[in-house]
Amino acid sequence: MKVLTKIKMVALRVWRAKALKYVVVCVIGVLTVGFLDENSAWSHVKYQQRIAELDEEIAAYRESSARDQAQIRALDRNPKAMEKIARERYFMKADDEDIFVLSDDDRAVTPTATDHATIE
């Protein structure tokens, strides 16, 4: 009880001081506007960082789009380019050739009949 009374007395002394009262209110206002409010300066900084990230992403998509548009124009002009893409991406082949696809993917090991004890 003594502690609460002392805190109350200190708070009243601080509140009665003319200059200190304004300082406390200003500090609370700055903290509210700077950090606690949803439109605070802190949120503004975070939004600016997010905008910068999105601008970089837009630039990457525009570059990719330009590259794809150039590839589409090349496909329209040159039938050999279409054949090259068909061979590389879709593994299509001519009538007189064979295709061997080599893969680095690790295949999942399928359990055998003797491995049932280790599965559980």
Image (tube, rainbow, N blue to C red):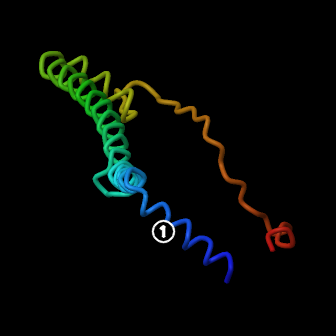
Quarter of the image with the N terminus in it: bottom right
Q: Residues within 10 Å of mark 1 (few under 14, many from 20)?
A: few
Quarter of the image with the C terminus in it: bottom right
Residue 20 higher or lower than 76, as above or below: below
Residue 51 higher or lower than 99, as above or below: below
Horizontal side, residue 84 vs residue 16: left or right = left
Horizontal side, residue 62 vs residue 32: left or right = left
Residue under label 1 = 12
Q: In the image as oriented, which residue stretches furthest toward the bottom?
A: 1
Q: Position of residue 97 (x, y in %)?
A: 42, 25
Q: Position of residue 30 (x, y in %)?
A: 36, 49
Q: Position of residue 87 (x, y in %)?
A: 36, 27
Question: Which kind of residue does numbered mark 1 sit on?
Answer: Leu
In depth, the one of 58 and 118 nearer the eye is 58
Horizontal side, residue 106 vs residue 83: left or right = right
In depth, the one of 62 and 36 nearer the eye is 36
Is label 1 in a helix, a strand or a loop? Answer: helix
